[in-house]
Image: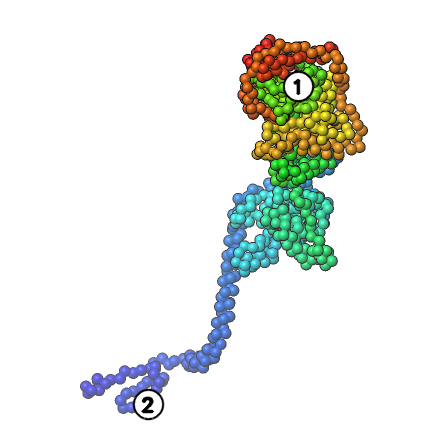
Amino acid sequence: MANRRDSRIEPSFEGPPRAKSSAGFSVSEEDRVVPSNPKTSAKRQSAKTKSSRRGRGKSRRGLFGVLGRLAYWCFVLAIWGGIATAGIVVYYGAKMPAATTWAIPDRAPNIRIVSVDGKLLANRGMSGGEAVGLHEMSAYIPEAVIAIEDRRFYSHLGIDPIGLSRAMVANVLGGRFSQGGSTLTQQLAKNLFLTPDRTLERKVQEVLLALWLEHKHTKDQILEMYLNRVYFGSGAYGVEAASRRYFGKSARDVTLPEAALLAGLLKAPSRLSPARDPKAAEQRAQLVLAAMRDEGKISAKELTTAMIAPASRVASYWTGSENYVADTIVEELPDLIGDVRGDIIVDTTVDLTLQKLAEQSIRRLIDGSGKKLNASQGVLVSIDNSGAVRAMVGGYDYSTSQFDRASEARRQPGSAFKPFVYMAALEAGRTPDSVRNDAPIRIGKWTPTNYGGKYFGKVTLATALAKSLNSVAAQLTMEVGPEAVVEAAHRMGIQSDLTANTSIALGTSEVTPLELTSAYVPFANGGHRPDVHFIRRVTTAGGKVLYDNNGGGAPRVVKPEIVGMMNSMMTGTVEIGTARKAAFAWPAAGKTGTSQNSRDAWFIGYTANLTTGVWFGNDDGSPMKKVTGGALPAQAWHEFMVAAHEGVPVRPLPGTWRSTPADTIVQDEIPPHTAQPAPVPSASVGQSAPSAQKASPPRAVRPAETVDAGGFGMPGGGGTTASIKRPVPPGDVGGPVKKRQTSILDILTGG
């Protein structure tokens, strides 16, 4: 029994039915307390039958399952993304001002500057050009811009989902941000209202503003605003400024290749500017032409023609010398009309034909002789008798240097300053026939000598001025006093500060070419000093007059008889003196000037029609190679004045003077005086004194006296005085000449 208990077998209901045996037992289905469900058993059997079939289709259904789950989650994410996007839009939109307060900001005002005959000189202002209506500009421009920048411009509502999606795909595939998705409306919104920052907030605001623009304005209005404000590179905002900048013409006259080039710049204005990279600009223009052909904007023939004949551009928009004039005018405008709040038109006094003639003359001489003579810069200023500036060239090339040497650079005038010395002497009682002894002299510690050390002995003042004798100019300054010379120069139009010492006779105080030229105008017009001006009238774009120069009064600053004597003397400079190269068919007068070591070379000359001043030199003050006022400046003056007077009736210079016959001049002796110390380093004719500060200002003699300092510094030197046997005009214009009680010995010792 024990063995049976040890080998007991527990009943099992899960294994397969076993055959009955004496060693165990089994329980059948019928022996269960609760019979099993026959349907369940059938299903179990059916599942076993189908298991093999499921194995075969498992891999196929697994792929669809993954895709299905992916689609599901994408849908879910899209919903949540839309919710998040809406939230961001609401958040950033709430930070913006109320839409009822939105308004298109005013376009930056343009200053249109035109010549005396209505030709455009320049545009100034932030916009750089006037606004041009969509119907006014070349039809190629909007077509080219739409073809390359926003093909669905006329069909979208301000944002282009198709274009945005295409840009996103291109950026993802390219692995970098190479395309935007902004429409022209979005770009306009950014330009009008937003900063260029690439932030999510700015992008959301851009979209909202674009939708608002589309709601408030027509497509044509949006396109017109865009084309008149967008940046085209090289400082040009708007199609008009860009057309002027690159092609030297209005946007109204732009051709197909030129329009393609302009449209191509919008992608990267600075990098693709033809002024910087002409090849890149042309390659981009060809892409624009291809896009226009794809869009049906141009025919195949037009495409071929444009490809063969690409856009031709001006050498440099900013190279013209008229830009010096434009800069000067812009600086003057606030004093005349206040702040510029809208587009205005400035009518100037400048004759564009004369301006170009002046520019060509300066450039030709520098191109031809500048390198050989070490002369790199030139200036020309021309003013009529009313004070109107007819031409002003401020340097060799505006594109390389915008510094205006005509109105801003102060240089030593050298002997070109001497007319004011002689005028003061005439006003003090001298005449062109007064005689001085041209010989070496010493004034305190300063010894002015003539160019090359050559002296002419006894000469009249007329001869001394014509030959630009330094010793005589210094003697006259001693006689009338440096203060009288300074007063005469300021009265005539010099505005710079002048140092009242004896060396001023040789032009050691610095002046600008514009003021020195203007100071000669009273000699040309009979003794009146007009206000020098560039602006005739300023009007709004609608024609309202903001400023009108009615001329005003030109006060008399020198008596007619003095003008006559000065013109008689300075005519000799052109006829027999240092400026013979300037002579032409008109009666002309003037004065040359050359500062120390030929650092500055001048000729200021005039007719009864125009007063023109010319300067040559270097910005760094380096010496030229023996260039004098009678060389390059006189040549440039001659070229310009011949062209300027072509077809103009000849007129004589104002005033008259008849030289006194030689037999009426009486020579009187002045007692000889002791010798002076040995001379110190000197300055040549037309050159500045080595050190103007070392010259001791002498005291003036009485106006009635005529002193000859010919024996200064010479043992036993004597002198003469020329007494004129007829009355001379008193020097009372501009105030009486100061009289000082002093002796000849005081003058000699510089006391």
The answer to whether residue 339 of the structure is visible from this angle is no
Observer-nearest residue: 159 or 168?
168
Furthest residue to the front?
715
In the depicted structure, whether residue 145 falls above or below residue 392? below
In the depicted structure, whether residue 98 falls above or below residue 446? below
What residue is disc 2 on? Answer: 19
Q: Earlier in the sequence, mark 2 or mark 1?
A: 2
Residue 625 image offset from top left, x and y in percent: 61, 34
Label 2: how many residues lie within 10 Å, few (<14), some (14-19) or many (20+)? few
- Secondary structure, mark 1, is strand
Residue occupying the point 65% across, 38% down: 369
Residue occupying the point 59% across, 11% down: 673
Label 1: how many residues lie within 10 Å, few (<14), some (14-19) or many (20+)? few
Q: Quadrant of the C terminus?
A: top right
Instruction: Specify the quadrant of the image occupied by residue 242.
Output: top right
Q: Amino acid at mark 2?
A: Ala
What residue is disc 1 on? Answer: 457
Instruction: Specify the quadrant of the image occupied by residue 239.
Output: top right
Residue occupying the point 55% across, 46% down: 196
Q: Amino acid at mark 1?
A: Gly
- Secondary structure, mark 2, is loop
Residue 206 image offset from top left, x and y in percent: 57, 48
Work out how far the residue at label 2 is from the one at label 1, CA to CA, in angstroms: 164 Å
Observer-nearest residue: 48 or 518?
518
Q: Is residue 500 left or right of residue 37?
A: right
Residue 581 image offset from top left, x and y in percent: 71, 31
Residue occupying the point 74% across, 29% down: 583
The answer to whether residue 717 of the structure is visible from this angle is yes
In the depicted structure, whether residue 260 falls above or below residue 361? below
Residue 169 image offset from top left, x and y in percent: 56, 59
Instruction: Specify the quadrant of the image occupied by residue 102.
Output: top right
Instruction: Determine whether label 2 and label 1 are within 8 Å by CB.
Output: no
